[in-house]
Image: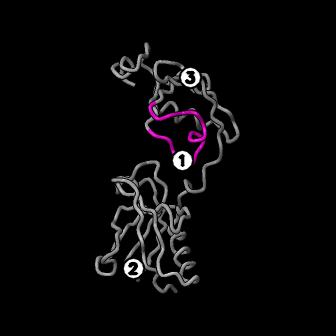
Amino acid sequence: MTPAIATALGLDDPHGVMVRDIAFPGPASKSDIHRGDVIVELDGKPVQSVNEITKQVQDFKPGMSIPVKVWRRGKSVDINITLSNLPARWAIARNSFSTIPALGLTFASLTDKVQQRFDVAWNTRGVAVSLVDKEKSAGLDLKVGDVVVQVNQSDVWTPAHIVSYFKKAQKENKEMVVLLVARNNGYRFVLLPVPVLN
């Protein structure tokens, strides 16, 4: 929080942390916290920096109800956030890859390192397209850095999920699967053929 931002928002004291985005699903998405809110107090303690909040929440446990004071549109608003366990899709295994050779596609877990490499938004959950064989994938609407969020309307967050949904589609004699893909300019649906998988 800079003095200039504090003045623009009508805050007398330039302390607090602005909420840039909210992860879904998660405790904050189920609370009344909004993008643009300024967190000025957390669990009764004044907030000065992001690092301070990060250290403070390490002592919190799932099930706790944490009081939060935010500054919103010129007023102080009191909110309670009930903490929960980390959603499964946020538990990412490092060095996890899967390949669909017939399509020339390799998928990787969306670790912090992979997110930074492909400039993926921090709150995106899914599986990254890490390698694309141009010959085998010719005509497919996928590129390196895309993030597969769903396969046939089911959330995916490990490379193995993608392979399992392709195998399921193969058993059901489906010719295509529908992917929901996050790209830097938004979300798109992508149809992929179902190859013969061993």
For residue 9, above or below residue 30? above
Q: Amino acid at mark 1?
A: Phe
Say whether residue 7 is left or right of residue 151. Answer: left
In the rendered structure, which amino acid carries the disc numbered 2?
Leu
- Judging by the rendered image, the residue that carries numbered circle 1 is 24
Residue 8 location (% of width, % of height): 36, 19
Q: Is residue 114 visible?
A: no
The residue at the point 53 percent across, 19 percent down is 76
Q: Secondary structure at mark 1?
A: loop
Q: Distance of mark 1 from mark 3, alpha carbons?
A: 22 Å
Amino acid under label 3? Val
Residue depicted at x 60% and y 56%: 88
Horizontal and vertical percent for residue 124?
46, 52
Q: Is residue 103 above or below residue 162?
A: below
Helix, strand or loop at mark 3:
strand
> Is residue 98 or residue 151 the one in the foreground?
151
Residue 11 in view, yes or no = yes
Mark 3 or mark 2: name the one nearer the start of the chain.
3
- Residue 77: which numbered mark, if any? 3
x%, y% of residue 171?
Answer: 58, 83
From the image, give the main secondary structure of the stretch colored magenta: loop
Measure the C-alpha gap from mark 1 to mark 2.
Answer: 31 Å
* Residue that label 2 marks: 103
